[in-house]
Image (cartoon, grey):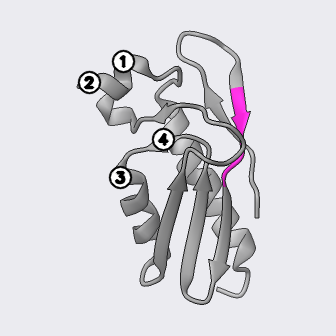
């Protein structure tokens, strides 16, 4: 399942459109992500999936949007925050898009 999400650009009104994808093989979910993610995204998705296994494959699907930084890190700074082109809502948008793709790929649950 592929879902589009808008990766809002920092300091601009436009957005990149990127697409994460998911695949389920047995009890294992794979998420293919268009950017470099923080470990927090995996933790958030594991909480959403409960007991299922998850493998994130980042920076490999539908081009790369760069670092996808959780909103709370923008105030703390750091390398990833300094070099990302994405605005702080991009992380939440990506997480919501992956969760939606999982729900739509798994309608029985």
**For the residue labelled by badge 3, is the local secondary structure a helix, a strand or a loop?**
helix
Structural distance between the alpha carbons of marks 3 and 4: 12 Å
Please identify the residue farthest to the top as the structure is shown. 11
Residue under pointer 2: 78
Q: Are marks 1 and 2 in contact (CB under 8 Å)?
A: yes
Is disc 1 surrounded by few (<14), some (14 to 19) or many (20+) residues within 10 Å?
few
Structural distance between the alpha carbons of marks 4 and 1: 14 Å
Structural distance between the alpha carbons of marks 2 and 3: 16 Å
**Residue at 67 percent of width and 48 percent of height:** 61
**For the residue labelled by badge 4, is the local secondary structure a helix, a strand or a loop?**
strand
Label 3 vs 1, first from the N-terminus: 3
Is disc 2 surrounded by few (<14), some (14 to 19) or many (20+) residues within 10 Å?
few
Label 2 vs 3, first from the N-terminus: 3
Res 82 label: 1
Is disc 3 surrounded by few (<14), some (14 to 19) or many (20+) residues within 10 Å?
few
Q: Do the residues labelled 2 and 3 touch (CB within 8 Å)?
A: no
Magenta stretch, overall SS: strand
């Amino acid at each position: 399942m592929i879902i589009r999400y808008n990766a809002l650009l920092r300091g601009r009104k436009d957005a990149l459109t990127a697409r994460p994808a998911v695949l389920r093989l047995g009890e294992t979910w794979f998420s293919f992500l268009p950017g470099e993610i923080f470990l927090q995204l995996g933790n958030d998705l594991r909480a959403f999936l409960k007991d299922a296994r998850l493998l994130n494959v980042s920076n490999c699907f539908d081009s790369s949007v760069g670092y996808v930084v959780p909103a709370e890190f923008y105030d703390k700074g750091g390398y990833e925050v300094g070099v990302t082109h994405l605005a702080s809502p991009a992380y939440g948008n990506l997480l919501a898009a992956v969760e939606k793709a999982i729900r739509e790929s798994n309608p029985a649950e």
